[in-house]
Image (cartoon, rainbow, N blue to C red):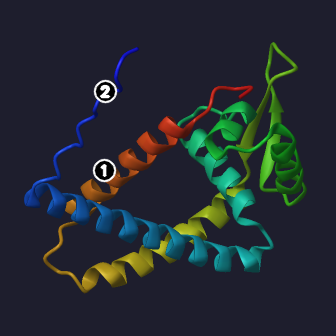
Amino acid sequence: MNAPRRTRRPAPPSEEAARTLAAIEAVVRANQRQVISLRTATARFLRQERLSLTDFLVLQLISLAADDEQPASPQEICRQLDISASTLTSITERLCAAEFVVRQRHDTDRRRTALLPTDSATALLQRHHRLLTRSYAEALAAHPGATLTTVQAVIDTLNAGNILCANRLELPMGS
């Protein structure tokens, strides 16, 4: 019978590594606060429009896909928001009834549907964007030394980290 192997405890991180880790943890908390604040502001904006936050996220994805000249596919929206097809169907029914979205059947495959934003959706998204732009401009004015290029680079880096985390947590279909 073999004797149990002793496992070595990893060496404690150096002081510099510990400071770096603490700084990254502070960035994570700050990013989470920012996401929550943005969610709160968006929810308050949407209350006036009688839309839910999830409805708005679907509308944003449909609009972003249209901006890229790639009609949004229901499957991709479900994957990105981690929602079921039946949930998306309910949301798109509400968005169509509110005249924010139109469904377009594929030319050759009638089973495929593309979701496209209407002019009303574009106007709503632009109002939300202008509201955020004014608020961000006011907040950034308090930091005249911060260059917008640096701010954008930091936000892009945090977004890349969020995407990496989401991809690592994604489960294969059927799990």
Picture layout, residue 88 above or below residue 23: above
What element does badge 1 sit on? Answer: helix
Type of residue at label 1?
Thr
Judged left or right of residue 52, residue 36 is left
Where in the figure is residue 9, as x and y percent of width and height? 24, 43
Residue 157: assigned label: 1
The residue lying at 39 percent from left, 69 percent from top is 29
At horizontal 48% and vertical 36% (from top left) the residue drawn is 168
The picture quadrant where one finds residue 21 is bottom left
For mark 2, what is the residue?
5
Above-or-below relation of 29 to 76: below
User: Where's residue 158, x and y in %?
Assistant: 35, 54
Q: Quadrant of the C terminus?
A: top right
Q: Secondary structure at mark 2?
A: loop
When the figure is inspected, residue 9 is found, relative to residue 36, above or below; the finding is above
Dividing the picture into quarters, in which one does residue 125 lie? Answer: bottom right
| Residue 112, position as x, y percentages in the image | 81, 23
